[in-house]
Amino acid sequence: MSSSLAAESAQNATALLMAGRAVDALQLLERVLTDQPDDAVLRRLAGEAALRAGQLQVATAHLEVAVTLEPDHVDGVVNLAAGLLGLGAAARVVALLEPWATRHPSRPLLLNLGRALQDHHRLEAAEEVVRRILATDPTDVEALNNLGTILRDAGRCGEAIACFERALTLAPQLQAARDNLAHSWLAEGDFRRGFAYFEGRRFVDATGLSARLERWDGRPRPGLTLHVVAEQGFGDMLMFCRFGATLAERGIDAILHVHSRLVRLLKRSGGFREVVAYGRAPIGATARWVPLMSLPHLLDLTLATLPPLVPYLQADRQRVHRYAGWLGPKVGLRVGIAWSGNPQSEQDDLRGRSVPLTAFAPLLDVPGLQLISLQRQHGLEQARHVGFAAQLRHPEPELDAGPDGFLDTAALLAALDLVVTCDTSIAHLAGGLGRPVWVALHHTPDWRWLRKQSVSPWYPTMRLVRQTVPGDWSGVFAAIAGQVANAA
């Protein structure tokens, strides 16, 4: 291919990128690269196009080649760092960018380096890098927001909140800062302020009701039928469906719209007059709608007034009997474990939520203990390679494989003695069922687990075990194993 044709292709791809057509630009560039694979410009553009299209593996593959061809081209290095960050390769990003931080301290480079250092648990170094950006421009809202997350991870919550508030003052529409501020207040246990800011979250209406009905303002009114729309992940739906009972206590007739796989389980939760799959309920003249996770704010609930409605989920008795038979005669403690969330989740930052299956090994030091896998889909590949694979029992492959999600798992949980899990939907299912459950938490966990408590205010049968050293699960599972041994 001639250099002029390569230059023309690069120009056309750049135009497509500027028009927001990243996928088209990537397809064009990949066709051209089959004939000219060593063109660094085309490789860099292909990497950028793949980044914008969200194809991180493809992006890093192109950018690795581009950086090899042009090791001194900073844009390629920065884009490669962005791709690697998205793939969770923080250590590689630190090694890639630290040599550049003195000779080419551009804002994008420092932002990526700060994020990588934070993910690599080097919080003091991350803070120093981000403050270099703010020394040049104190109004850089992205840097302010990033600094806030670093300070939050370091346990300096007051300073973190000040950063998020400053960022929002400068850029009131900055969604990341608003979310971080909401989560920070909630983690501090200030539910009034936290849930008020939480109202600014992104909400995806799976029912279309928001375009047809007036949104409920929290006031009861004669003849009101309230259509409550579940949102975000399964764990959020399982956690917040408890407020149907609160609505009923206040005389509010409510229908819950939820993912179809949860309908049969949540019909057992009580409170809601009806539980339906998204959008499958008639709409009356006096109807209003509301997002499920807005209920604590509208009901003016605080940490002190959370309703103690546990258990509010019920397992199917016939299924419980079936799984009790599958477990067989009771010899020692029967402990169900879950170690991985959904890595593709768009609702939550999964950094630090999942736990390597190998970390659960200390539980096997408890005499007579049986380990039962509660993991479905994501993370199962670890079970084939872990050293204690032969000691891990797996329910039949069709567990919850049908249209009704969690019915089988709920029954299995009801037949177990204990659940030990990472921060995933299994924790909420076990907690809602009132089962004993231990949750292994990252050193800076999600807001709902608050900051220091070992007992969850949401689930009285739940115990929270937190990392004391960032990234270190060994202490967490040593503590859990010790407590399990005492209970055995």
Image: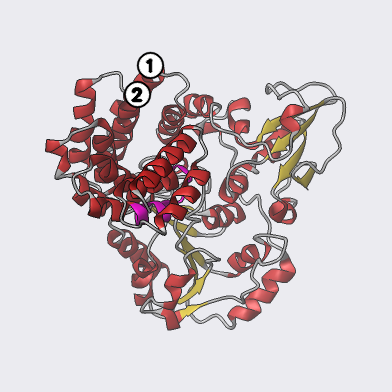
Observer able to see residue 54: no
The residue nearer to you, when weighing 146 against 261, is: 146
Res 485 quadrant in image: bottom left
Q: Secondary structure at mark 1?
A: helix
* Vertical comparison of 101 with 214: above or below: below
Q: Magenta span has 61?
A: yes
Residue pictured at 44% horizontal, 49% vertical: 29
Percent x, y of residue 225:
81, 31
Q: Secondary structure at mark 2?
A: helix
At label 1, counting other C-alpha atoms closer than 10 Å, the crowd grade (few under 14, some 14-19, many 20 or more) is few
Quarter of the figure that contains the C terminus: bottom left
Percent x, y of residue 292:
65, 37
> Is 447 situated left or right of 39 in this image?
right
Magenta-highlighted residues = 52-62
Residue pictured at 68% horizontal, 57% vertical: 314
Residue type beneath disc 1: Leu
Observer able to see residue 374: yes
Q: Which mark is residue 471?
A: none
Q: Magenta span has 262?
A: no
Percent x, y of residue 247:
71, 34
For disc 1, the marked residue is 170
At label 2, counting other C-alpha atoms closer than 10 Å, the crowd grade (few under 14, some 14-19, many 20 or more) is many
* Vertical comparison of 71 with 156: above or below: below
For disc 2, the marked residue is 141
Verify CB contact (< 8 Å) between mark 1 and mark 2: yes
The residue nearer to you, when weighing 428 against 103, is: 103
Res 183 quadrant in image: top left
